[in-house]
Amino acid sequence: MQHDGLVGNEFDIYGALPQNVVKIAYSFWSAMIGPPVTPFPDPDFAVTASGAAKPSAAAAAANDHPDEDPVPSHAFRASSVLDVRGLGISSTLATLTPVDAITLSVSHGESLGLVGTVAAGAISVALAIAGRLPEGASVATGSILVEGIELVGLKRRPAARLLGTAIGYLPADPLSGFDRSRSVRNQLAGALRKRIGVTPDVARRHIVDLLDLVGVVDPAARARQYPQDLDPVVLHRVVLAAVLSGDPALVIAVSPGTGLEPDARAAHAILLRDVWHAKEFALLVASTDFEIVAETCDRVAVLEAGRIARHGSVAEILDAGYGVKSARSARSARSAASIASASSSTASSGLAVAD
């Protein structure tokens, strides 16, 4: 929990390796076992979202500014669960902001919040990492590694295998991933059986246990319901349980608690934080609400106009004047009151998690 991660224009120690050393290592690696995805991506090339190789933004930047460190770093990048270098996103959509030169990393047990206005680009970055960019937006430059696997240019089938296992995704709309014609139990248990090959009875019991874990009252009864019939607070918790069923290394939450009343939304953020503390996955939260990000994350990156403008701990960002409005008092006052309010219709958000 002491690792500060990588955000903005910071670089790990390997980013400082001389390029000739990296290229020799790359050549040796390629000769022995074939061209790698990691830990030695080709220093002079990046893979676009379409899979075509082209000179990387890093190489171009290095030529323009030979005295500056190149972005992305071209060495051992697999130590973090999530490692993003020089990410650029193009968009023709009015609802999705283009971003440029985003660099960040999150390790096991770490949390990072991306926050900014609607037009800042935080949501764009999270959707790109989760492989959820809508048509009209695409990754234009850069690299995204999750558990050492390059996601940019990855084909649809292996990308789908990663989503739901290594990567857990909490969408802003909790109904978006559900089939409304099937019960919660059938959908979650079916997905679990497909992933780990357990019997139907074992899968159903495990789903009920997970629903209980995230504070759903009478989880067996709720599991038999259809998703659209659930209380909104319960529905958000069901989606969290579904994500946990994949035992992900990285959880990406986009605008967590969307559509909930303020107290319930705060309680959901606390629940997400508590689950993260217990399970120690890497957590990335993207939101326009600084208070939600401050409630769930240790570190914050503030985006403005598609770039990271500042980053640091929650306290450092608050001290810099960002998000001061009610955030300081909210973190202390809401913890007790909001949980009690939201829990009256569901359950207490306190967790006792056993792996």
Image: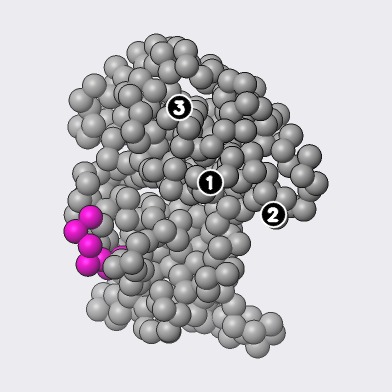
Query: Start and end of the magenta stretch?
Result: 88-95
Q: How far separated are the C-alphas under marks 3 and 1?
A: 17 Å
Where in the figure is residue 203, as x and y percent of width and height?
A: 73, 42
Q: Is residue 80 left or right of residue 314?
A: right
Say which residue label 2 marks: 195
Q: Nearer the viewer, mark 3 or mark 1?
A: 1
Residue type at mark 3: give it. Asp
Q: Which quadrant holds residue 261? A: top left
Instruction: Please name whichever residue, 132 or 225, is drawn nearer the observer in this view of the structure.
Output: 225
Say which residue label 1 marks: 181
Instruction: Please name whichever residue, 148 or 227, is drawn nearer the observer in this view of the structure.
Output: 227
Where in the figure is residue 116, as x and y percent of width and height?
A: 25, 44
* Residue at 44% across, 43% down: 175
Number of labels in the image equals 3
Q: How far separated are the C-alphas under marks 2 and 1?
A: 22 Å
Element assignment for label 1:
loop
Say which residue label 3 marks: 231
> How packed is label 2: few (under 14 Cα within 10 Å), some, or many (20 or more)?
some
> How packed is label 1: few (under 14 Cα within 10 Å), some, or many (20 or more)?
few
Element assignment for label 2:
helix
Magenta span contains residue 90: yes
Where in the figure is residue 18, as x and y percent of width and height?
A: 46, 74
